Amino acid sequence: MTRPIRSYVLRQGRTTPAQRRALEELFARYGIEFRDAPLSPVEIFGRKAPLVLEIGSGMGETTAAIAAAQPGTDFIAVEVHSPGVGSLLRKIEALELRNLRVVRHDAVEVLSHMIADGALAGIHLFFPDPWPKKRHHKRRLVQPGFAALAARKLAPGGTLHAVTDWADYAEQMLAVLSAEPLLENTAHGFAPRPAHRPPTKFERRGLELGHPVHDLLFRRRTP
């Protein structure tokens, strides 16, 4: 069987004692185990509300800030790296965020198996791994197959918000998302940064290196 190409590498980053404790003690409360069946947002959050999936929440600062600022929306963050998951779990606990949960698993598999078609009000993809070397471009997440999958999971009018500070990846994202029949660009090309998206550490680092930051905001077409 052919192994799928992953858009990430599980790096052996150091997990701090506090992050390890969070994984051991808080995941049962704020985490969602991967399953091969669509999840029920009402069962998880105890209400019916717009649902946003964040792919690659990193250390969780931006994820937690957005969830705290939008209490009427429910968020599921998907992250594979232990330090990031532990860090976000600590933030959920500290901020008492009832509208944010975490899945520690591959995002494409989560989208494919755990999210029903048309279930999402939004997908956030902030600063995915750019895989800058040309021979690694096949590992980039935003490819036609991903665009089709993401569009299918969005409700009509739902948005896919992607951000990168790598110019050639931004152009690739723009071309790929523009070619997906179920999606329409909300801007002429790249979009201005929406006020609800806080700057991230990757954004600050990119700007320091002289990399312009590109936001892409696409909408699922209505029938």
Image (cartoon, rainbow, N blue to C red):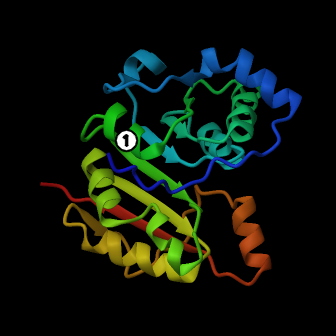
Q: Where's the N terminus, which quadrant?
A: top left
Amino acid of disc 1: Leu
Residue nearer the viewer, 70 or 183:
183
* Residue drawn 70% across the image and 24% down it: 96
Residue nearer the viewer, 67 or 124:
124
Picture layout, residue 108 above or below residue 21: below
| Residue 129 place in picture, x, y as percent | 59, 62
| Residue 220 place in picture, x, y as percent | 27, 57
Residue 154 in view of the camera: no
> From the viewer's perspective, is 200 left or right of 32?
right
Q: Quadrant of residue 60?
A: top right
Residue 65 in view of the camera: yes
Residue nearer the viewer, 149 or 158:
149
Residue nearer the viewer, 190 or 135:
135
Q: Secondary structure at mark 1?
A: helix
Q: Where's the C terminus, which quadrant?
A: bottom left
* Residue drawn 46% across the image and 44% down it: 107
Q: Quadrant of residue 222?
A: bottom left
Q: Quadrant of residue 133?
A: bottom right
| Residue 170 place in picture, x, y as percent | 49, 77
Q: Residues within 10 Å of mark 1 (few under 14, many from 20)?
A: many
* Residue drawn 42% across the image and 64% down it: 142
Residue of label 1:
111
> From the viewer's perspective, is 15 left or right of 145?
right
Q: Residue furthest front?
A: 1
> From the viewer's perspective, is 16 left or right of 8?
right
User: How many numbered marks appear?
Assistant: 1
* Residue drawn 44% across the image and 69% down it: 138
